[in-house]
Image (spheres, rainbow, N blue to C red):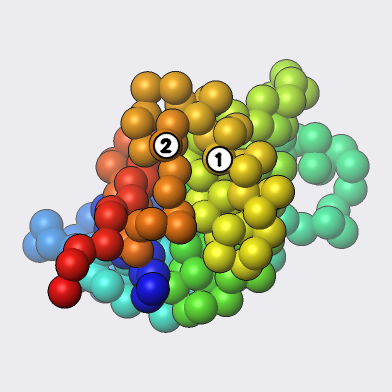
Amino acid sequence: MTRAVLVLLVVTAGACRSTPLYRAPVGNTAAATYDAIVADGDRIAEEDEALWRCELAMAALRIGDEAAAFQALHGASRIMGTLESSRRENRRAILGQEATKVWKGDPHERCMGALYKGLLYWRRGDLGNASACFKSGLFADGHSAEGAHQTDFAALSYLLGWVSYLRGRDEQARFSFREAAQNAPDNPYFADPRPDEDNVLVVAGRRSTDCSARSARPRES
């Protein structure tokens, strides 16, 4: 059975700012917004590069340029997931003191970046890196400003379950599906995952950066 993941991403970058980094375009279209973000790349300060790349990735997804979106997210993730910075700077990154450091995103922004990048890896057929991204997102979701461990991002768990099933990691798939259902008990698709029967997974986003996923049963040809 041929399986596919269909990504419908219309989500804005989850930035902790009241206004975007780029100058608002004259035309209110997805293409105009993308062009405006690209044009402003040279004036973006170094400490805002990751945020600019996240905004660029979201704009690229809206116009259907997955290659540009992947490149932008890959560059952002190198900054947002930097391990060479000091322990104090890493702590500030978690606390989200945006005005005093290089922007690396808060936990939710990091896990959303991991989700999008994982979906793009999946679309390329690279299930191993897709799985690694979803796991990275769940790890990021487990760190809040108060240091509490949450790890309750149901969509990430569900996606990890699907990818794990496709990779033959049945135990990981069962665990992830169960985790998704526990964290989103009102979602009927999470409560009854059937990756062995479904042949299409649709992932849709909203401007609030909420993300949902649903699967579709194979149709008779």
The residue to which callout 1 is attached is 177
Looking at the image, residue 218 lies above or below residue 187: below
Judged left or right of residue 187, residue 63 is: left
Of marks 1 and 2, which one's residue comes earlier in the chain?
Answer: 1
Q: Residue furthest front?
A: 220
Residue 129 in the image: x percent, y percent?
64, 69
On the question of residue 127 being in view, the answer is yes
Residue 217 in the image: x percent, y percent?
28, 55
The residue to which callout 2 is attached is 192
Name the residue: 27% across, 62% down: 218
Q: Quadrant of residue 143?
A: top right
> Nearest the camera: 55 or 176?
176
Which amino acid, mark 2? Asp
Helix, strand or loop at disc 2?
Answer: loop
Q: Quadrant of residue 32?
A: bottom left
Name the residue: 74% across, 21% down: 148
Q: What's the mark number on residue 10?
A: none
